[in-house]
Amino acid sequence: MSNKYYEFFCPVKVIAGKAALEHIPYELTGMGAKRPMIVTDKGVRAAGLLEPVVSACEESGLEIISIYDDVPPDSSTSVVKDIAGIYRNEKCDSLIAIGGGSAIDTAKAVNILVSEGGDDIAKYSGAGVIKKPLKPFLVVPTTAGTGSEVTSVAVITDTKKSVKLPFSSSFLLPNAAVIDPRMTLTLPPHITAATAMDAMTHATEAFTCMAKNPLSDAYATAAIKKISHSLLTVMDNPKDAEGRLELAQASTMAGIAFSNSMVGLVHALGHATGAICHLPHGLCMSLYLPYVLEYNLETIREPLGELLLYLDGPEVYAATPSNRRAEASISSLRKLRDELHKRCKLPRTLKETGSVTEDQLETIAEVALDDGSIMFNPKEVLLEDAREVLKRAWA
Amino acid sequence: MFAKHIQPMVFQARRLYVDVMFQVMGRALQAVSEIDSAVQAEARALPDGFLFEMMVMPHGSRLIVEHIGSGRLHYHGDKAPRPIDLSIQFKHIAHAFLVLSFQEKTSVAFANDRMLVNGEISYAVRMTRILNRLETFILPKLVAQRAVKEYPKSLHLPEKLISAARIYLKVATNFVETARAS
């Protein structure tokens, strides 16, 4: 009997493509919601990304009751409490998150408070605390990277205690993720590159780490193919709506993949670097990915070799001897990273970021070792191993 | 018909095995924290008085250890003196049996969603490293290789044998003391 076992869960309805935003009123009214609140940030408003959502709703006779557009990049418990207060005062009955990871995580946490009651979001921190469905909730991602629209977790900072509170429950998942190419068209080149590499890392780690399974593999490989095919095209032609949609879909697919198979050392190092040096998450992912794949190489040779097909296409795959495919996959990712550096100066090493000092590497290694993602890395990681990877990523 | 009669006995034996393994592991965790500096270094990061539990859902076997300071762990049996800080819970006794009979590595069991973690994840990662270190000492290499993600290259036979002997001696002593006290 096979020892293999896996779980896979994604109940989020994905609404993707041309005029996807115009489906929002239908989806909300279908769930009995009549008074939606939008949760977003100043950047989204400034980029003019609220108008298409608001007008899509108004055209269908669905009034947006309230718009909160002041979500900070690192959301906090007090922000969540404030938004929940507005939601209650305005008698809203549903939420629409528009933005990247922070706006989406904030809306997830607000949904807990307005559904479960109370003002203290910390009370609901942890896994499996929430036991029943929450209010109707839609997510409109404006970056193509985090995959937060299909993950059942949220992280909010408790500013008083200076700790990050994790929330995990399948009830945090939105009812639908609305992926419309209009929402990522204006994304600046360096954010396009970093977020796409975030999605690439989600998919690559999902495909090579310990909890990989046939269903997450299918999503991961499809995401890698889309990113490899479209990223440089979009970098050269940012208004390419088709390419933008491909990247946005890839991000959602990578999100579905990694939320069902977890991630590994790239994320452990990335989380630690983000916490200590405040580097953007996507940048950390792009930077560490090749070095961690090299570290894991002998443990993941087979799946990594398989990825060459999705990274470089069937001709390169067929022309590469099977025992060289894993190395070729790493080279392909390095090449992509170099091309991104050429186009938007996306740093390739820690030194190039200008935000990390060499004496911080030891602390990064120590913090990474306690990160939950490290449990799912296919190869055991000791402190000296983490140090070695960081040394290679330094310059 | 035969299977119908034999099945309850198999379930009973499995429950007994998991129960005994928890008792051995709890005592061995205390013992390894008394003799191994690497385990002490790992445990030192836990707050003093930190209570760790490993249990089978919903009300099955459990082991509770406390960090009593300086990297030392103390086995409390299956009764917690205070609310637990970190709980690793097997969803079913069959999953606990797979791990405790070394058919499934602890890391694989996590990846396979056999267990839930209730509490600070970074402490769970640390406790898993302590459990792995313990298993590499007390199990024969061939069995330990099935239990941990990677058998440490730096652990050589003399160190392993001496540490295992000291741990088993302390576990046996603890069993005798418990029996005398009850």
Image (spheres, rainbow, N blue to C red):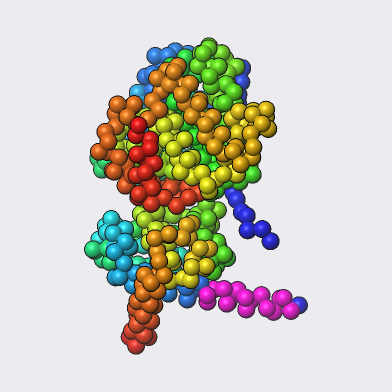
Please give the name of the residue rendered at 27% of the width and 36% of the height, measured from the top-left corner: A358
Judged left or right of residue A299, residue A283 is: left
Question: Which residue is situated farthest in the bottom direction here?
Answer: B180
**Magenta stretch?**
B2-17
Please give the name of the residue rendered at 35% of the width and 49% of the height, measured from the top-left corner: A384
- Residue B13 located within the stretch drawn in magenta: yes
Point out residue A300 in the picture as x, y percentages from the top left corner.
Answer: 55, 45
Query: Is residue A137 depicted above or below B79 in this figure?
Result: above
Query: Is residue B178 depicted above or below A80 in this figure?
Result: below
Point out residue A329 in the picture as x, y percentages from the top left corner.
Answer: 56, 34
Chief secondary structure of the magenta portion: helix
Q: Nearer the viewer, residue A358 or B3?
A: A358
Residue A375 appears in the rendering:
yes
- Residue A139 located within the stretch drawn in magenta: no
Quadrant of residue A19 within the rendered picture: top right
Question: Which residue is situated farthest in the right direction here?
Answer: B1
Q: Quadrant of the C terminus of chain B?
A: bottom left
Please give the name of the residue rendered at 61% of the width and 54% of the height, measured from the top-left corner: A5
Q: Nearer the viewer, residue B138 or A37?
A: B138
Point out residue A145 in the picture as x, y percentages from the top left corner.
Answer: 48, 28
Judged left or right of residue A47, residue A333 is: right
Quadrant of residue A21 within the rendered picture: top right
Q: Nearer the viewer, residue B133 or A202?
A: B133
Please give the name of the residue rendered at 37% of the width and 30% of the height, measured from the top-left corner: A349
